[in-house]
Image (cartoon, grey):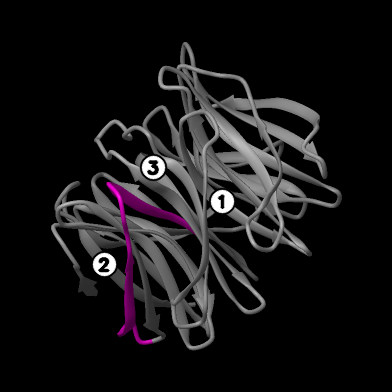
């Protein structure tokens, strides 16, 4: 395993495959948090590293490839805390192939917000994330032009707590999946048309969805259900792997990889398309997986090594 650290705390959150390697976005804390963007080659060696910061704390949470560079998202100019912090502005920026910033946008929605998902769609960009009025939490979806200028935005109900899961693009619609808490945690889906109007709202069941994707037109979830590592293809099957949580999904030709934490250790598990366990592997102790990506016939895995607040990046390559 290869490890990197760039401050008192180094947190990788999301990644995207690229020619010759992978880009990872996350956050680094020394005095304040800054957005971290780094490129690793397919051997796991660091090629370049960028930090973006400014007033107060900045955190990176999402990344997507576009024709002439990358879009990165997160939350900026807020005050970080273990509870999530306050006064965050939702953030979107475009960078070139070498991580140099081309433009940036900051958005105020309800008063405390973060971009957790970026979906480029033709001549526009769809953003999804969390927002809060200071006491209760919600989700938002925003559509922008290719320079990040808002075209429309949509917020939803307010709950005691809410956790964004993902944004899935469909034909003529998009679906936001998140987890909400009033009495207990449940997973909810909102399908929206191209103008942000609700087509369908559905509760998918109990649990917390920490990563979601589309699998042949159905919603695939991994997360936490009754404190167990949970995987579900909604309407088809579900399985649990033991005490822990699933945090990352990568679909392969012959099955699905899930990353997360089991019994305090970072793990990757492979399931077949019927939800049956093929294998699972412990990667390192004291930590969890945040990103799994397919890179040139190899599976790239990165996550947190060490206890929260003292973590650094762990990197593994698995042959498939």
Image position of 28 (left or right of 150): left
Instruction: Give above or below for 156 relative to 316.
Output: above
Counting from the top left corner in percent of width and height, residue 232 is at 58, 41
Picture residue at 15% right of the left edge, 53% below the top? 31
The tag earlier along the polypeptide, 3 or 1, is 1
Residue beneath label 1, please? 117
- How many labels, in total? 3
Image position of 172 (left or right of 38): right
> Badge 2, how many Cα within 10 Å: few under 14, some, many 20+?
many
Instruction: Give above or below for 201 relative to 220.
Output: above
The residue lying toward the viewer, choosing from 14 and 89, is 89
**Real-space CA distance between mark 1 and mark 2, rounded to the nearest whole angstrom:** 23 Å
**Real-space CA distance between mark 3 and mark 2, rounded to the nearest whole angstrom:** 18 Å
Picture residue at 25% right of the left edge, 53% below the top? 33
Quadrant hosting residue 83: top left
Q: Tag 2, which secondary structure?
A: strand
> Badge 1, how many Cα within 10 Å: few under 14, some, many 20+?
many
Instruction: Give above or below for 167 relative to 95.
Output: above
Residue beneath label 3, please? 245
Picture residue at 52% right of the left edge, 78% below the top? 96
Q: Are marks 3 and 2 in contact (CB under 8 Å)?
A: no
Determine if the magenta segment contains residue 66.
no
**Real-space CA distance between mark 3 and mark 1, rounded to the nearest whole angstrom:** 20 Å
Counting from the top left corner in percent of width and height, residue 308 is at 19, 46
Quadrant hosting residue 129: top right
Q: Tag 1, which secondary structure?
A: strand
Residue beneath label 2, please? 314
The tag earlier along the polypeptide, 1 or 2, is 1
Residue 258 visible in the picture = no
Prevailing SS of the magenta stretch: strand
Counting from the top left corner in percent of width and height, residue 7 is at 16, 62
Q: Which region is colored magenta?
A: 43-62
């Amino acid at each position: 395993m290869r490890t990197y650290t760039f401050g008192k705390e180094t947190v990788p959150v999301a990644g995207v495959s690229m020619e010759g390697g992978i880009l990872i976005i996350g956050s680094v804390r020394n005095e304040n948090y800054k957005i971290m963007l780094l490129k690793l080659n397919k051997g796991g060696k660091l090629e370049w590293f960028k930090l973006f910061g400014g007033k107060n704390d900045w955190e990176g949470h999402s990344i997507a490839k576009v024709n002439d560079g990358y879009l990165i998202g997160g939350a900026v100019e807020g005050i970080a805390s273990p509870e999530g912090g306050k006064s965050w502005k939702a953030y979107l920026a475009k960078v070139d192939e070498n991580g140099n910033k081309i433009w940036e946008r900051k958005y105020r929605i309800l008063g405390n917000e973060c971009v957790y998902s970026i979906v480029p769609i033709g001549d526009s960009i769809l953003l999804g994330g969390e927002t809060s009025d200071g006491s209760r939490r919600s989700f938002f979806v925003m559509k922008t032009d290719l320079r990040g200028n808002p075209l429309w935005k949509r917020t939803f109900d307010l709950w005691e707590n809410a956790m964004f899961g993902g944004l899935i693009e469909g034909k003529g619609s998009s679906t936001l999946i998140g987890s909400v808490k009033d009495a207990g945690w449940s997973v909810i889906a909102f399908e929206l048309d191209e103008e942000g109007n609700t087509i369908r709202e559905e509760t998918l069941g109990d649990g917390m969805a920490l990563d979601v994707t589309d699998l042949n037109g159905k919603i695939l979830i991994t997360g936490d259900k009754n404190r167990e590592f949970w995987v579900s293809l909604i309407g088809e099957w579900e399985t649990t792997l033991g005490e822990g949580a699933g945090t990352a999904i990568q679909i392969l030709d012959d099955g699905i990889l899930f990353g997360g934490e089991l019994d305090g250790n970072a793990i990757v598990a492979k399931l077949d398309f019927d939800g049956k366990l093929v294998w699972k592997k412990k990667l390192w102790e004291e930590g969890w997986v945040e990103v799994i990506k397919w890179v040139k016939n190899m599976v790239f895995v990165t996550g947190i090594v060490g206890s929260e607040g003292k973590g650094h990046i762990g990197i593994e390559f698995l042959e498939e």
